Image: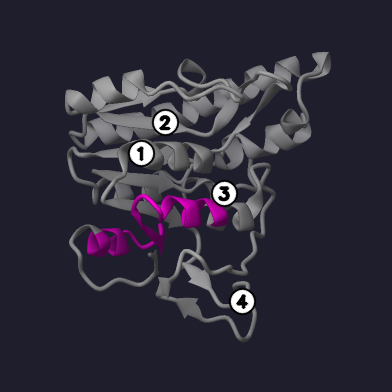
């Protein structure tokens, strides 16, 4: 079993509303196996821009209703684009909108995931605006879904496709920054995210990766180089970071 995250900064330009990198996604999809995995994708500019504008993480307010609805609509559009590309590549992917199995503040319902996996389908889910038991509404990040799925299914490999080569000794761009190939899960890291992110930024993402590493081998690679995904899938040498 594999668990793969399509980072929002890979499939989309986060600074440009509703931008979609179809050519990048197609190259990634063409590298994937036909079964035996799950995919979570980020929101990119389909979610982050409006989530920031409407302050969805701040909880429910009457003036936010249209923003909440627009985010869900835009995320379904993004998900449909990925779904179509996967099906066109003969991958039996099935969309799993987060609001169909998750309310933040409650335990996640895995029943549909169990059924899909038992029948050999490929679940495709994503970060989105969802309901919250106390705040009313909130953002469910794709990274939270990755963590919950990793805890439940303990995949052999969990792969994060990002817009950088991996985890560094210093923030990317720093003159002393060096790529770390093997990263112990009990070690802290320093990095940065240059675009707006309402789901916690890169520091939170690394904390999630470290937690997932308790249940799975975690790989962090550059999604703009799909040959590196192929290397990881085939247990070959690769450029990137593995968290153990």
Task: Classify 10 Å Cα crowding around label 3: few (below 14), some (14-19), many (20 and above).
Answer: some
Judging by the rendered image, the residue that carries numbered circle 2 is 125
Which residue is identified by label 1? 39
- Return the residue at label 3: 13
Cα gap from disc 3 to disc 2, whole angstroms = 20 Å
Secondary structure under the numbered disc 2 in the rendered image: strand
Q: CA distance from mark 3 to mark 1?
A: 20 Å
Q: Secondary structure at mark 3?
A: loop
Q: Residues within 10 Å of mark 2 (few under 14, many from 20)?
A: many
**Alpha carbons under labels 3 and 4: distance apart:** 24 Å
Q: Is residue 92 left or right of residue 58?
A: left
- Which residue matches tag 4? 170
Earlier in the chain: of badge 1 and badge 4, it is 1
Magenta part of the chain: 207-232
Closest to the camera, between mark 3 and mark 4, is: 4
Residue at image position (41%, 38%) is 40
Q: What is the secondary structure assignment of the residue under circle 4?
A: loop
Furthest toward the bottom, the residue is 176
Query: N-terminal of the two: label 1 or label 2?
Result: 1
Instruction: Look at the image and say whether residue 212 sits in the magenta stretch.
Output: yes
Q: Nearer the viewer, residue 157 or 184?
A: 184
> Are circles 1 and 4 on residues that touch, CB within 8 Å?
no
Where residue 112 appears, as percent x and y from the top left, is: 33, 19
């Amino acid at each position: 079993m594999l668990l793969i995250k399509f980072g929002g900064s890979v499939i989309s330009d986060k600074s440009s509303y509703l931008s979609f990198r179809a050519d990048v996604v197609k190259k990634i999809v063409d590298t994937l196996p036909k079964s035996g995995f799950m995919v979570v994708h980020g929101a990119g500019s389909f979610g982050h821009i409006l989530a920031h504008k409407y302050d969805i993480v701040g909880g429910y307010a009457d003036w936010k209703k249209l923003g909440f609805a627009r985010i869900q609509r835009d995320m379904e559009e993004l998900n449909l684009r990925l779904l179509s590309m996967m099906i066109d590549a003969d991958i039996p992917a099935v969309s799993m909108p987060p609001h169909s199995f998750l309310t933040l503040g409650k335990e996640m319902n895995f029943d549909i995931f169990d059924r899909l996996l038992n029948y050999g389908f490929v679940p495709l889910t994503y970060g989105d605006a969802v309901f919250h038991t106390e705040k009313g509404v909130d953002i469910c990040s794709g990274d939270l879904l990755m963590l919950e799925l990793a805890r439940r299914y303990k995949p052999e490999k969990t792969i994060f496709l990002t817009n950088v080569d991996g985890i560094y000794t210093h923030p990317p761009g720093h003159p002393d920054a060096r790529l770390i190939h093997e990263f112990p899960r009990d070690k802290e890291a320093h990095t940065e995210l240059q675009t707006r992110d309402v789901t916690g930024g890169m520091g939170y993402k690394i904390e999630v990766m470290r937690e997932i590493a308790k249940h799975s081998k975690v790989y962090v690679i550059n999604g703009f180089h799909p040959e590196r995904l192929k290397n990881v899938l085939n247990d070959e040498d690769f450029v990137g970071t593995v968290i153990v």
